[in-house]
Image (spheres, rainbow, N blue to C red):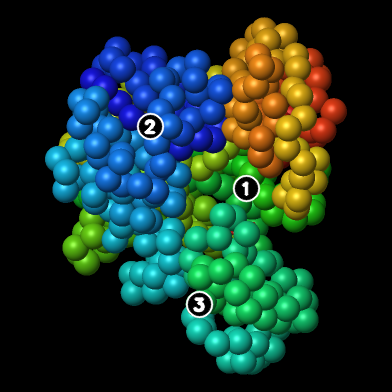
Amino acid sequence: MNILLLGSGGREHALGWKIAASPLADRLYCAPGNPGIAKECELVALDVADHAAVIAFCKANKVDLVVVGPEAPLCAGMVDDLTAAGIKAFGPSKAAARLEGSKGFTKDLCKANNIPTAAYERFSAAAPAKAYVRARGAPIVIKADGLAAGKGVVVATGVAEAEAAIDMMFAGGLGEAGAEVVVEEFLAGEEASFFALCDGETAIPLASAQDHKRVFDGDEGPNTGGMGAYSPAPVMTPELSQRAMDEIVLPTVRAMKAMGAPYKGVLYAGLMLAADGPKLIEYNVRFGDPECQVLMLRLMSDLVPALLACCDGMLRNFDLRWYPDAALTVVMAAKGYPGSYAKGSVIEGLDAAAAVEGVEIFHAGTKAEGGRILANGGRVLNVCALGKTVGEAQARAYEAIDRIKWADGFCRRDIGFRAVARERKL
Ligand code: AMP
């Protein structure tokens, strides 16, 4: 098969690495890709927002399957357009991608189907939203309805902070994404990322994973796209996974089918493990980044048949196998991220780092220039490792990181701390 992967981050590098290992993959392309992905795929200079150009490339190069990595093209209807052109594509349709594209849509779907989630209200103007905040008190959570590249959620510890977030969103601080706002109850508990492959009717869970969203050690500081992740997540017991499937994922798949927008692709449920069970924080309609990186390292089965089964409605009898080893990834980011940061600094020592046993390095925001690798984004590298335990994977990942010479970069030093503490207790 000829396969085209769309995207350019660490998630796509991990997907490309796994797809390249498939005996089914003949020619593998990626647009726009990055220098790490270039080791696995032929990079194509396509504008992913130009659906007609993507379709023309697929036809000219006899592409049999398109795998869409990020949410923006999914929410823009990339899969609808490819399907209409007779090209198979992995990922949800535009209508199904509303599960990520509109937080209000998802909250209403949860309410209508008794899916456990935080109590909420939707607003299209600041004054009533602020009145609701004052009536509920803090802590409280303010969310822009639309896609905001991970910046659309403010967990406010005080009413003034919540009101400022509401003003910022309605003043256009997040563009169109903030034209509508969801105000919701603050949920306490530990978070877990839960992924399921869906074919419109059936869903099968992937291995458990957990990420670290805050920028500093100890899960402190502002939210980011994710500073590290690991799998398995010991907190996600088989019983909790079953509840997440029965109470959250499967009712969603049924509801989407009933409304004529069957969900196909990978569904990523961000869960809060509250005292009375798992609750949905949000859905994403693609693999999580950096959770995808650890899942791909642990996946023993060929990924390509699984992606095809999602497209073709054939998941019912599908089974995925996983390596028993743990995987962990540490994100190396440019100093200043998630605020402003500089681009263009030189990164050295990547080969020495990759030589550490069990280590795999995926590129996110990098650029190749004159034979050197330069930082070209906020999250720049994913240093991943397999190990017998999360603790061993963690030690290997940090050994590799210590071999990387990048003066303008930083990373958290405690990725996986909860899982490692749980392992020590066993
Ligand atoms: P989201 O983009 O919806 O995943 O939100 C980003 C982060 O904000 C989540 O990973 C949580 O840490 C936090 N968050 C979102 N909603 C809530 C909530 N209702 N209660 C507590 N924390 C939340």
Q: Secondary structure at mark 1?
A: strand
Residue 212 percent location from the top left of the image: 67, 44
Residue 269 percent location from the top left of the image: 46, 52
Which residue bears the numbered disc 2?
A: 5
Q: Residue at x 27, y 45 (%)?
A: 52
Q: Secondary structure at mark 3?
A: loop
Identified by mark 2, the residue type is: Leu
Can you say whether 181 is above or below 275 in the image?
A: below
Residue 299 in view here? no
Residue situated furthest front in the rendering: 370
356 sits left or right of 194 in the view: right
Which residue bears the numbered disc 3?
A: 180
Q: Earlier in the sequence, mark 3 or mark 1?
A: 3
Residue at mark 2 to residue at mark 1: CA–CA distance:
21 Å
Camera-side residue of 208 and 314: 314
Q: Residue at x 82, y 33 (%)?
A: 408
Q: Residues within 10 Å of mark 3 (few under 14, many from 20)?
A: many
Residue at mark 3 to residue at mark 2: CA–CA distance:
32 Å
Quick check: is the Cβ at mark 2 less than 8 Å away from ligand 1?
A: no
Quick check: is the Cβ at mark 3 less than 8 Å away from ligand 1?
A: no
Identified by mark 3, the residue type is: Glu
Q: Residues within 10 Å of mark 1 (few under 14, many from 20)?
A: many
Q: Residues within 10 Å of mark 2 (few under 14, many from 20)?
A: many
Identified by mark 1, the residue type is: Gly
Camera-side residue of 323 and 179: 179
Residue 302 in view here? yes
Residue 28 percent location from the top left of the image: 35, 21
Q: Earlier in the sequence, mark 3 or mark 2?
A: 2
Can you say whether 425 is above or below 119 in the image?
A: above
Q: Residue at x 40, y 36 (%)?
A: 46
Which residue bears the numbered disc 1?
A: 225
